[in-house]
Amino acid sequence: MSCEYRAPTQLIEAHLHERGWTHRVLAVILGVDDQTISRILTGRKAVDAEMALTLQVVLGIDPDQLLQLQRSYDLAKAQIEVFIDPNIATRAALFGELPVAEIIKRGWLTGITDIRDADLEVALCNFFGTKSVDEIVLSYATKKTGVTAVTAAQLAWLFRVRQIAREMLVAKYSPDALLDAIDRFKNLLGSLEGASKAPHILMECGVRYVIVESLKSTNVDGVCFWLNDLSPVIGMSLRLDRIDNFWFVLRHEIEHVLRQHGRAFALLDIELEKGRAGAGSNIPEEERVANEAAVDFCVPQSSLEHFIARKSPSFTDRDIFGFAKTLSIHPGLVAGQLQHRTGRYDLFANHLVRVRSAVRAGALVDGWGEVAHVGL
């Protein structure tokens, strides 16, 4: 038989007709009642693998062909009869990409304690400032030159920074004061305790400085954006608990503020270390100038070049301590720059002291078990 069939029943009927058999004859041969055959041939009962093999013996029907027809028929029937909740795709995108459980655990959604909470979707809409859940992932056009998109988790981190920053009371922003602050920061580079003073100095300049622990697998280091086009915000994650990374990321974001980057859209800085902390031609201009300002702030590059030329390829602890002392900076800043220059991130790690505890003492913090309680 070369005819094409749309349903398994058509194929069975064709074979019965060829033999001149009635439905009752088939029922007798198969040893089943008439009702069973009637249900199969009217499509109310699907042909299973056992029946397909039986009909191969009785009617010579290819069981694979019969079962394929049954699957195609079932799918076509379901497409007509089954109602698919139109919100399923939205929920898949939302809950599949957004770490909702972690956000709940971090206390970002007021009154929500479980992912099955009836008010969860309303709380998420409030958090992202949207009217419906299908707008959430696309609710904020976050862009960054050279980066086509951010993940939903990175977007959530950004919104938490924004949420906290809106609640802060700071002085009116003054670019001159921020320039003066850079000189004040240089006097703080020599000790771990100096980092703890940075948040207060920034607030005196009118910069809203927020520390939010990163969500898992986001690799966010910092962000720069503006509230109402008047008040700059610097958010940092301190995901790398190292003194060199702290000062590099902070100075990087300060340069964005001074150049008024982030006014049109937030500049989300991801993995600001290793290759992304350089000044290569493949790095966007906004990031290149911020990187250059940051590396020269941490360790004056002309001095570093001279140091490397004298001591390369071997850098002893004594060399690092001595060079840092001449510049009045912490040895960890020298160590971080040497790691980047040599590509040997396994070296000099003993100088990269932890800084998070010191900085948290003087800043508005959300994370590491601490929740910044803000209004929605």
Image (cartoon, rainbow, N blue to C red):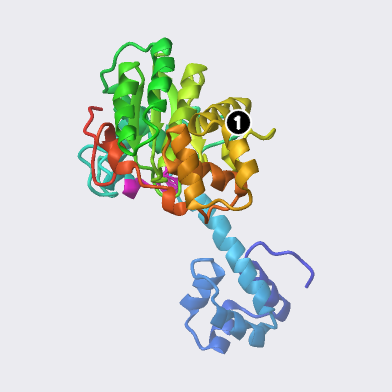
Left or right for 209, reference 32: left
Instruction: Give how far across and how far down residue 328 sits, in percent.
Output: 42, 33
Residue at 36% over, 27% down: 162
Left or right for 36, reference 238: right
**Res. 64 image quadrant:** bottom right
Amino acid at the residue labelled 1: Ser
Q: Badge 1: few (under 14), some or many (20 or more) residues near its Cα, within 10 Å?
A: few
Viewer-side residue, 214 vs 71: 214
Question: Label 1's element?
Answer: helix
Residue at 24% over, 36% down: 361
Quarter in which the C terminus is drawn: top left
Residue at 44% over, 44% down: 332
Does the image show residue 71?
Answer: yes
Left or right for 149, reference 365: right
Range shown magenta: 87-102
Q: How many marks?
A: 1
The secondary structure that most of the magenta stretch takes on is helix
**Res. 222 image quadrant:** top left
In the rendered image, the residue lying farthest to the right is 2
Instruction: Give how far across and how far down residue 10 sits, in percent.
Output: 65, 67
Residue at 55% over, 62% down: 74
Quarter in which the N terminus is drawn: bottom right
Viewer-side residue, 202 vs 41: 202
Does the image show residue 125?
Answer: no
Q: Label 1 belongs to which residue?
A: 302
Instruction: Give how far across and how far down residue 177 sits, in percent.
Output: 38, 13
Above/below status of 67 relative to 30? above
Viewer-side residue, 22 vs 208: 208
Viewer-side residue, 143 vs 110: 143
Instruction: Give how far across and how far down residue 59 sits, in percent.
Output: 67, 83
Q: Within the magenta stretch, is there residue 363?
A: no
